[in-house]
Image (cartoon, helix red, strand yellow):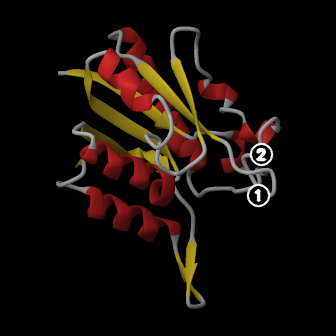
């Protein structure tokens, strides 16, 4: 089965001093760098997803430095870049048609945020019939709050990976 590396939302706003800093962003990016190197070595297609929020949001505003894909893993000319406006990378984008046209049936997924766009995209990929390997240490998230309680990023990460494991993805 032909596979592709899918890199979700590794954009400047998620790194230190960005508008929506994540826990472990650099560590995840370092793993993603190694996945990119491996993919280039074996000619595995690489797909970058770039999220753009509405202009009244607090991050990923079109035309800003924070919205740009990290320079440290920037796409090359042969890579596919897909812009999205929703957490689901398949919703109202050409991702599904690109995958079908290129005979890709398996996605190796990494990126940011585990609890939002990664989770939503992985779940949707199952609906479209794709096999997914989700690279646990190639993802980053943040502390979340509910009812005044802070849920640490490490717990958020483990919880979302555990909920995807098996049915929606193979966690690797």
| Residue 171 visible | no
Q: Residue at x 30, y 22 (%)?
A: 100
Q: Residue at x 55, y 49 (%)?
A: 86
Element carrying mark 1: loop
Judging depth in this view, the residue of 160 and 137 nearest the camera is: 160
Quadrant of the image for the N terminus?
top left
In the figure, 22 relative to 27: above or below?
below
Q: Is residue 71 left or right of residue 88?
A: right
Q: Is residue 14 left or right of residue 29?
A: right
- Mark 1: few/some/many CA within 10 Å (<14, 14-19, 20+): few
Residue on which disc 2 sits: 61
Q: Which mark is residue 120?
A: none
Element carrying mark 2: loop
Judging depth in this view, the residue of 89 and 71 nearest the camera is: 89
User: Do the numbered discs 1 and 2 sit on residues whose CB atoms are within 8 Å?
Assistant: yes
Q: List the single residue furthest toward the front.
A: 92
Residue on which disc 1 sits: 57
Q: Quadrant of residue 35?
A: top left
Residue 164 coordinates in the image, percent (x, y): 28, 57
Judging depth in this view, the residue of 36 and 81 nearest the camera is: 81
């Amino acid at each position: 089965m032909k596979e592709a590396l899918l890199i979700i939302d590794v954009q400047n706003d998620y790194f230190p001093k960005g508008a929506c800093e994540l826990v472990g962003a650099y560590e995840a990016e370092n793993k993603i760098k190694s996945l990119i190197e491996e993919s280039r070595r074996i000619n595995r297609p690489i797909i970058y997803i770039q999220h753009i929020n509405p202009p009244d949001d607090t991050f990923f505003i079109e035309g800003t430095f924070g919205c740009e894909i990290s320079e440290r893993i920037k796409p090359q000319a042969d890579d596919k870049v897909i812009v999205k406006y929703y957490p689901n990378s398949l919703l109202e984008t050409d991702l599904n048609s690109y995958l079908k046209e290129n005979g890709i049936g398996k996605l190796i997924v990494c990126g940011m945020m585990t609890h939002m766009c990664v989770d939503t995209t992985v779940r949707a990929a199952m609906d479209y019939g794709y096999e997914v390997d989700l690279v646990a240490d190639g993802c980053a998230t943040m502390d979340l709050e509910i009812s005044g309680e802070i849920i640490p990023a490490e717990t958020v990460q483990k919880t979302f990976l555990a909920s995807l494991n098996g049915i929606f993805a193979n966690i690797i």
